[in-house]
Image: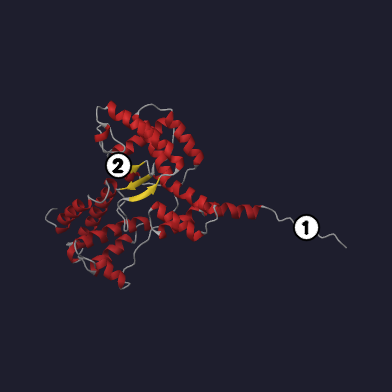
Amino acid sequence: MDRFPYVRLLKEYLKAKSAVLDGPTLDVRRRNLQRVFQVLLDLRRDRIIDTLDPRKYAKNEIDALVSWTDSKSAGYAAKLWTAIEDFLLYNDNDIVKRLEAKSQWRRPYPTYAPGPVKDEDWLRDALGRLDALVGWRAEVAKFVVAFMFGTGLRPGELRLADLSDLDTRRWVFKVMHPKDVPGAIVGAELVVYADTRVQVLDFLVARERRVRELGFDPAKVVALIPSERGKHFSEAGFRNLRVDTFRDAGLQGDYRVLRRTHEQILMDRLEAHDYKEGSVIEISAKRLRHSIQTAVRHYADLRTGRGQRAAQDAWETPIVKVTDRRG
């Protein structure tokens, strides 16, 4: 299929994007755009579209793809159009933006259901279970759980961190590998709060011991969390470490839940300190380094369960009327 411009341009696009998208995200993007190409081949065969060259797509091609994605779930359609639009823009084709500006194309938005979160009792139990395990991989898992719980980092941001990104004198962590999203700042400083610092110091002691056991000079090992080769863990290696240690410790969940948990606890504590809704959202957005819109969505959705419980309590609690017997 290399004779098709789409295939050649897709290879160039994926190569360029490999510098800014992590492995799993890039794989999803590749699969989605390959699936789109198969659909386009069928559309071209049926003479519904005029070209297979993404540089020449016009309203006809976009309308045909809309008809196809309309049968998909909102979440999947949103992912497909994110990939399609970005691929076209890479090839200097802004047809999607132009159609959207003319109200001739409507961007699909995925429905959102808030994921589960943990709590501080879970953290204490998890750290105790991991502490009972022996070995470097258990030390890594214990540190990652504590640090992500206490900072709200993304897994990739911690996996790719260097030792120099963590300043234990000022107690700040520099996010040098943020997620590739609009407005992401390389080097943004994240305060490491007091209840996380003990776990950090314990890990740094274990790290130096492990590095020496591997025969490396601790001063020359760059990775904050070094693998057995003294390098940063691969994405797959980092995931497998979590799967293995969580299984051995009898824990459920993954690292991503810890980011959601940090946001939930932060919002709850801000409210407990009488911060109003607007301030809770703004402070949380800044801490988690995502948009105000994302924080608003999480603020509302994370409280859905609380609101439902409050409504149930109000409904099921009988109203006691006091009869005035005077007179």
Residue drawn at point x = 19 percent, y = 53 percent: 16
Dot 2 alpha-carbon crowd within 10 angstroms: few under 14, some 14 to 19, many 20 or more:
few
Dot 1 alpha-carbon crowd within 10 angstroms: few under 14, some 14 to 19, many 20 or more:
few
Residue drawn at point x = 46 percent, y = 57 percent: 281
Task: From the top left corner, tell me how far across and down residue 238 is, in percent.
Answer: 31, 38
Q: Is residue 197 visible?
A: yes
Secondary structure found at label 2: helix
Look at label 2 and name its amino acid.
Ser
Who is closer to the viewer here, 4 or 270? 270
Residue drawn at point x = 38 percent, y = 53 percent: 289
Task: From the top left corner, tell me how far across and down residue 117 is, in percent.
Answer: 46, 45
Q: Earlier in the sequence, mark 2 or mark 1?
A: 2
Please determine whether, in this image, residue 293 is positioned above or below residue 119: below
Residue 104 falls left or right of residue 292: left
Task: From the top left corner, tell me how far across and down residue 45 is, in percent.
Answer: 19, 61
Residue occupied by mark 2:
164
Q: Name the mark on residue 322.
A: 1
Q: Is residue 112 visible?
A: no
What is the quadrant of residue 207 in the picture?
A: top left
Q: How many marks?
A: 2
Task: From the top left corner, tell me how far across and down residue 253 is, in percent.
Answer: 42, 40
Who is closer to the viewer here, 210 or 58? 210
